[in-house]
C-alpha cells in the first residue's frame, strides 16, 4: 500500500512538472512570435490647422411653383390639340382650339340688334330736333319735348348695352384659342379632339421649370442656426449643375412625424432641373478660422471610441479623439491630439496600440519622433 502511494506521488509530480514546462514554452513562443512579427505597412500624414466652412447637408425635394393646369373658360367642342405630351412650349404658344361657331352666330345676332337700335336712335335724334324747333315757336309744350328727349336717352342706353353684348361675345370667342400661360413642358393631355368641354374642365397640364422651390428638411436642433439669407448649395441627380441660392424662408412649424424644420430655397432659370426630383442642399452656417483636419480613413472605431494612431519611433500608439465636421474627405479632430502630430492614414484599421509599423513613402519633412508632445497625448492602452 505504501509502495503504491509513493508511485502515485512520483507520477503526479512528474505530470505537474511537464505541464509547467509546456506552459513556459508556450509563453516563450508567444513572446518570440510577437517580437519577430513583421511591421504593418502604413502611410502617414501630419495634423495641421486649416480654415474650414461649417455646413449642414440634407436631402429634400423640388417643387415647381408654376405648374398650371389649363382649363376651358367657355363651353365648346375641342377642334384641335396642337401639342403632344412631353413637348416643350413657350409662353403665348397656341396649344388648343375650341369650336367658335356658336359665338359667331351670337355675334351676328348681337350686331343686328346694335344696327336696329342705331337706326331708332338716329330717327329719335331728328324727332327731338324738330320738336325743339316747334317748342321755340310755341307750337308744342315743353313736356312733349322732354318726353322725346327721354326716349332718345333710353335708346342711347340700349345701344350701349347691345354693343357691350357684342364685346362680351367677342371676348368669349377669343377664349376658344387657348395659349400657354408659361413656358414649360406638356405633362399631360386631359382631353382629345372632338370632346365637349364645359367651363372649368381641365384640358392640358404644363410643368414649368422656370421657377422651382427646394424643400430641405433639417433636424430640429439645426433650426436655431439656420436663418433666411444664408448661402445654400443645391445639387440634383437630374442635373450636373450646382446651383447657388439662399435660404428664402423657414416654415414656422416643426414637422411632427420627422421632427424636422422645412427650409425653403428658390431656384430660378435652371431648365435642366426637374420638378419632383430629389435635391441635396448644403447650408453654409459659417467659417471656422482654424481646425485640425485629418483624412477620414485615419479615424477608426474601437471599443473605447473613435481613435487615431500617433506615430513615434516607428510605432503606432492609440489616441482617443473627438471628431467634428466632415468636409471633402477630411474630418475635424476637436481634441485628443496636437497640431503637427504624425498619424497613420492607410492601414490604421489593422493596428492596435503599441504596434510596430513600416512607413511607405513617408515625406522627407514628416518626423515620426513626437516625444516632445508625448506628455500631452491621451493614450488609450
Image (cartoon, grey):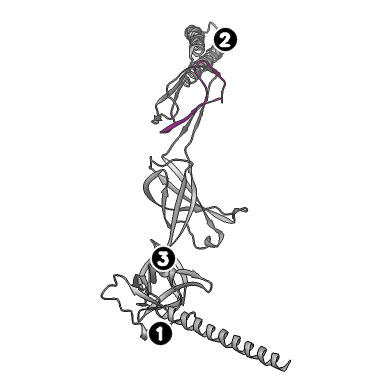
Res 144 label: 2
Q: Does 147 sit above or below residue 55?
A: above
Q: Main secondary structure of the magenta part?
A: loop
Q: Nearer the viewer, mark 1 or mark 2?
A: 1
Q: Which mark is residue 297?
A: 3
Residue assigned mark 1: 374
Disc on the earlier residue, 1 or 2: 2
Q: Which residues are magenta?
A: 180-202
**Nearest the camera: 2 or 39?**
2
Kind of element beneath mark 1: helix
Label 1 to label 2, Cα distance in Å? 122 Å
Vertical side of 262 occupied by 336: above or below: below
User: Who is closer to the viewer here, 351 or 309?
Assistant: 351
Q: Are marks 1 and 3 in contact (CB under 8 Å)?
A: no
**x, y percent for residue 123:** 48, 6
The image position of residue 323, as x and y in percent, is: 46, 70
Q: Is-magenta flag for residue 325?
A: no
Q: CA distance from mark 1 to mark 3?
A: 23 Å
Whether the residues at callouts 1 and 2 have beta carbons within 8 Å, the answer is no
Amino acid at each position: 500500500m505504501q509502495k503504491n502511494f509513493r508511485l502515485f506521488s512520483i507520477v503526479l509530480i512528474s505530470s505537474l512538472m511537464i505541464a509547467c514546462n509546456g506552459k513556459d514554452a508556450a509563453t516563450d513562443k508567444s513572446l518570440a512570435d510577437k517580437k519577430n512579427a513583421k511591421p504593418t505597412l502604413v502611410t502617414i500624414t501630419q495634423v495641421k490647422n486649416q480654415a474650414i466652412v461649417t455646413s449642414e447637408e440634407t436631402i429634400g425635394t423640388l417643387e415647381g411653383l408654376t405648374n398650371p393646369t389649363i382649363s376651358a373658360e367657355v363651353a365648346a367642342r375641342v377642334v384641335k390639340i396642337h401639342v403632344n405630351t412631353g413637348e416643350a412650349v413657350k409662353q403665348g404658344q397656341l396649344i388648343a382650339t375650341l369650336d367658335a361657331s356658336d359665338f359667331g352666330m351670337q355675334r351676328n345676332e348681337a350686331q343686328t340688334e346694335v344696327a336696329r337700335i342705331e337706326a331708332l336712335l338716329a330717327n329719335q335724334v331728328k324727332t327731338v330736333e324738330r320738336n325743339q324747333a316747334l317748342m321755340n315757336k310755341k307750337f308744342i309744350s315743353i313736356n312733349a319735348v322732354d318726353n322725346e328727349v327721354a326716349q332718345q336717352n333710353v335708346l342711347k342706353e340700349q345701344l350701349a348695352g347691345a354693343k357691350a353684348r357684342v364685346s362680351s361675345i367677342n371676348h368669349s370667342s377669343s377664349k376658344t384659342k387657348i395659349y400657354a400661360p408659361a413656358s414649360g413642358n406638356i405633362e399631360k393631355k386631359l382631353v382629345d379632339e372632338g370632346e365637349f368641354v364645359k367651363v372649368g374642365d381641365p384640358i392640358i397640364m404644363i410643368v414649368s421649370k422656370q421657377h422651382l422651390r427646394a424643400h430641405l428638411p433639417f433636424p430640429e436642433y439645426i433650426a436655431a442656426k439656420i436663418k433666411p439669407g444664408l448661402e445654400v448649395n443645391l445639387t440634383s441627380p437630374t442635373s450636373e449643375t450646382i446651383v447657388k441660392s439662399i435660404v428664402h424662408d423657414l416654415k414656422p412649424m416643426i414637422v411632427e412625424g420627422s421632427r424636422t424644420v422645412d427650409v425653403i430655397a428658390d431656384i430660378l432659370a435652371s431648365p435642366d432641373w426637374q420638378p419632383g426630383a430629389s435635391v441635396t442642399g448644403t447650408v453654409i452656417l459659417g467659417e471656422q478660422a482654424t481646425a485640425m483636419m485629418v483624412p477620414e480613413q485615419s479615424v477608426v472605431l474601437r471599443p473605447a471610441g473613435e481613435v487615431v494612431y500617433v506615430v513615434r519611433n516607428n510605432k503606432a500608439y492609440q489616441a482617443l479623439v473627438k471628431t467634428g465636421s466632415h468636409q471633402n474627405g477630411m474630418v475635424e479632430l476637436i481634441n485628443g491630439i496636437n497640431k503637427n502630430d504624425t498619424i497613420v492614414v492607410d492601414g490604421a484599421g489593422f493596428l492596435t496600440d503599441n504596434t510596430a509599423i513600416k512607413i511607405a513613402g513617408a515625406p522627407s519633412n514628416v518626423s515620426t519622433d513626437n516625444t516632445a508632445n508625448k506628455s500631452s497625448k491621451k493614450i488609450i492602452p
